[in-house]
Amino acid sequence: MTWDVLVVGGGHAGIEAARAAAGMGCRTALLTGDVRAIGRMSCNPAIGGLAKGQLVREIDALGGAMGELADGAGIQFRILNRSRGPAVWGPRAQCDRALYARLARERLEATERLAIVEGMAESLLEESGRVAGVIEESGERLFARTVVITTGTFLNGLMHTGERRTEGGRVGEAPARGLSSALARAGLRLGRFKTGTPPRLHRDTIDYDACTPQEGDDPPAPFSFRTKSLPRRQALCWLTSTNARVHALIRENLHRSPMYSGQIRGTGPRYCPSVEDKIVRFADKERHTLFLEPDGWDSEEIYVNGLSTSLPEDVQRGILAAIPALSRARMIRPGYAVEYDFVFPDQLALTLEALDLPGLFLAGQINGTSGYEEAAAQGILAGINAALAARNEPGFVLDRSEAYAAVLVDDLTKKGLEEPYRLFTARAEYRLLLGVDTVVPRLLPHARRLGLVSEGEYAEAMRSEERIRDAERGLRERTFTPSLENRRLFEETVGVDLAAPTTAFKLLQRNDLSVESMALISPELFGTLSDEERRILENRVRYEGYIRREQERLDKLRPFESRPIPAGFRYAGLPGLSTEAAEQCTRRRPRTLGEAARIPGVTPAAIAIISAHVARAEGSPPG
Amino acid sequence: MVDSAVLDTIVAPATPAGRSALAVLRITGCLAASIARRLAPRLPDPIPARRPIVAVLHADDGAAIDEAVVTLFPTASSPTGEDLVEISMHGSPVALSRLLDAAMAGGARPARPGEFTERAFRSGRIDLVRAEAVRDLIESRTPAAALASARRLAGALSARVSRVRERLLSAAAGLTASIDFADDVGEAPPPEVAAELREAADALDRLASTWRAGRLLSHGCRVAILGRPNAGKSTLFNALLGRDRAIVTEVPGTTRDTLEAEVDLGGVAVTLVDTAGLRATEDRIESIGVSRAHAEGERADAVFYVFDVAGGFAEEDADALARLEGRPRLLVANKADRLGAGADRLAADADRLGSGAGALPDGAVLVCGLHPHAGETLRRLLTELVAAEVSTESASEMLGTRRQADLVARARDAARDALVALGNGTSPEYAATHCDAALSALADLVGETTSEDVLRHLFATFCIGK
Ligand SMILES: Nc1nc2c(ncn2[C@@H]2O[C@H](COP(=O)(O)OP(=O)(O)OP(=O)(O)O)[C@@H](O)[C@H]2O)c(=O)[nH]1
Ligand SMILES: [Mg+2]
């Protein structure tokens, strides 16, 4: 038989890809080396965080599983950047590692039209220039109209602990060797990245008195719009930090670290794959925070977030000994680095389909990204697009102003990669429009159109946004006149002199008034809004001008950004256009000027030339 | 389909029309070298780079056009970023026009105004600020203006802008770090952010303030001489010019139409305007002159208001002055000699005597228009009035166009907004939008993100051949 969509790999990208494809009605198979490894968190036992939390909510609004899985397996929930506006809130959950994997597997097993197949993909089947399936190690052939590869860090995986090397993509799991060369044979350029993991410690051997406890939010906020409530009981995390002795020890042993590149790139703070990098890049920082994260309710393992390293075991022991809270800690497993093949993602279209091999989609760490959330976001987009391609329908591509997921894919496919790609809010041009507060109205309509959420779920989820908008309207319509009674009310309740007739909206814009204080004056203004909805409303009102300006900026740029470049437009020989720009554009076939402008080698001057000629081709002046 | 590349090699004379010792023709584009070979088949093959070669130029039919010097600047060393051929020939309009025809027969098309500079900009050879300086340099009317443009052309202003951009970028990075690395670097934006923003705002403000001088240098200014009949306006006008331009008589109402003449004052090209004396009159011609005088008063950047100190400062003078409220002006009390003191003493130190001189209104300057050194004194006074900024700025880079001034002011305001936001506890993701706005104004300034419309207008103001 021929599958509509065949997903290779059962990690976070594979889960989303398989579920999306099956959810869109495709007969889907998920091929994994080990069903017990489905949904395994190979790195830290947490989902979300800065920018990543926004991604999880986006995945959720597109009908993905990650949000609900994290809600189900979460043992501690926090929103990072909570003191700021919702545009930069980063929801994060500490998860029970084993529970997460179990829930993920159950979820997949319960998915209609989805079959889970155990086996390792060895090479690709090709037919008349298209991918037609994969050949397993066993020699078995699996035929499929589209194939999504999500093998994470397993391609030619090699683990380093100091000078010691072991083959594999994760501890105890074999690497995928054949697939790497199959991809290379298919003409894809591969590169090699390294990523680090920290040591795991036994929870009963840590001196918690020397740590600062970190509690979850009360009440906890779920990732998924489907999750109605979360258990109140939450686990504690603990903070400690490195110190001068640790730094000195690391510096002395730098030459023994395979992770340390010896180069310092850039000046600003960047994503640091290892503690040795951090110490070299931020030489003047006296300490770095370490987060001690439990691996689950019943697990004995503690994950030392912030201490990823590939230094030899004896150095790791020395580091622990130099940190008071960890000086007697028993190391269950030392930290190690994984080195693996990735495919340069500039060989993919915005649908994540290989430019030169139709039917082949790649998603996740295989594309050079880091993080579960980045992987899952690509997974769901690749799954959707593989399903569409299997049905011969045009691809699904989001705009950069619409989703962090789009920023991620656009960056990956357009720019070169020098280190594992991690999402930051700063990568988005329209950060203020991409907050968690706008995820549902931004993306749920797409999910509904694609058939990934039910009508009932849609209507229910959109209700929250409607409530906020209604409340905002109510604030604008409600005017407080400075009657004697009102003035006394304001003076006594919130200490504000109501001198002139003022709308509730204007009052809420004042720095000395908040939703809480306004609710004292007139509780019905905020009627049934939840806590989170109140915070969102307050921000929208207070920073109304900022949000409007951002929207105006987008509207102003949109005619350029979305100006279509006709299919088959000829770049070669355009006067003044560099050969490099012409070649890049010819290959990547940008659909709009905005897309073209983000291709490396395409300068603003080149865009001006292309724009003028597109206009000429259309017979209208460029706008 | 026509191969658009063929259409797009451009040609234009780089020297003014008319007979002259030399004329220069330039061809740029991918066909430039092959056209040169077609015009001068004897050129060595390949044509050596950047070496002037004497060659005989031929028309298509083989008839000789002229003997000329041909130089090829290949893409790597060409100011336009494409092959460029420069031909220096004898300045014969007939030969030049035959050569143009021959070049066009070889596939070049006549260049639009500013197209050579536009190509230099589009190929990334120069930024927009420097491209504008090309035009400003050509159009400068005084040596000081030419010097300021030349500095911009050499990249002094661009360098200054890029230093400010560095600061803003570093502030933006700091703000962003406090959002994206809040768990690592802490939630409070680092203190350097405010410092960088302040430095950037100050630098931008200093830059914006150079526009007063820059504008004077590039656009010059207009100074009207106003006053009642017989006050001595035309006398002062002549003294300023150093020549007898206007008719002077003792008859009130001598000047009727306005008279213009240009002087270089401290590098500023000042257009002086002499006007009819202000008074109510039945004479039709004179009354038209009077309304023109008023109109000049409104239009001018600065005004010299003259009155006869012996006749005294009358109510009409006060009325006329009131109409000029808020504009740079100088009140000139002329005919100082008639106060009784010696004419030479007063002209020599015609400082502001203020109220100390009895009935003189505030700020009036005593002058004797008949004094042989009156011109120098008046030029000094006028320079102080309109060109003071130019002399203080002359050592630094100045903004040269309104476009530049507007964008720098916008960047400054945005940097200040960012500072205010940072100071009043606005969340950094919002403060960062101001920082981005400042950066994007500066990106516009140097032409990285300038819209096509603006560019088209801008290059259309160039002359052909540049
Ligand atoms: N004593 C004396 N006579 C002066 C002085 N300046 C100008 N005059 C004389 O004043 C008379 C009028 O001078 P103009 O320069 O024609 O005066 P105006 O203001 O241009 O007069 P209208 O054109 O008629 O408005 C002439 O006879 C000048 O010689 C001065 O400083 N001292
Ligand atoms: Mg006169």
Image: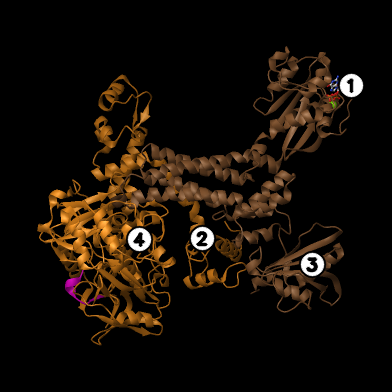
**Earlier along the polypeptide chain: callout 3 or callout 1?**
3
Image position, residue B231 (x, y; %): 81, 21
**Disc 4 sits on a residue from what chain?**
A
Marks 2 and 3 on same chain? no
Q: Give the magenta part as a residue range.
A: A29-39
Q: Which residue is mark 2?
A: A563
**Disc 3 sits on a residue from what chain?**
B
Q: Which residue is mark 3?
A: B100
**Earlier along the polypeptide chain: callout 2 or callout 4?**
4
Alpha carbon separation for disc pair 3 and 1: 59 Å
Q: Residue furthest bottom?
A: A139
Image position, residue B182 (x, y; %): 31, 50
Q: Residues within 10 Å of mark 1 (few under 14, many from 20)?
A: few
Image position, residue A303 (x, y; %): 19, 60
Q: Is residue A240 one of those drawn in magenta?
A: no
Image position, residue A361 (x, y; %): 35, 73
Q: Is residue A34 one of those drawn in magenta?
A: yes
Quadrant containing ligand 1 reads top right
SS for callout 3: helix
SS for callout 2: loop
Q: Which residue is mark 1?
A: B251
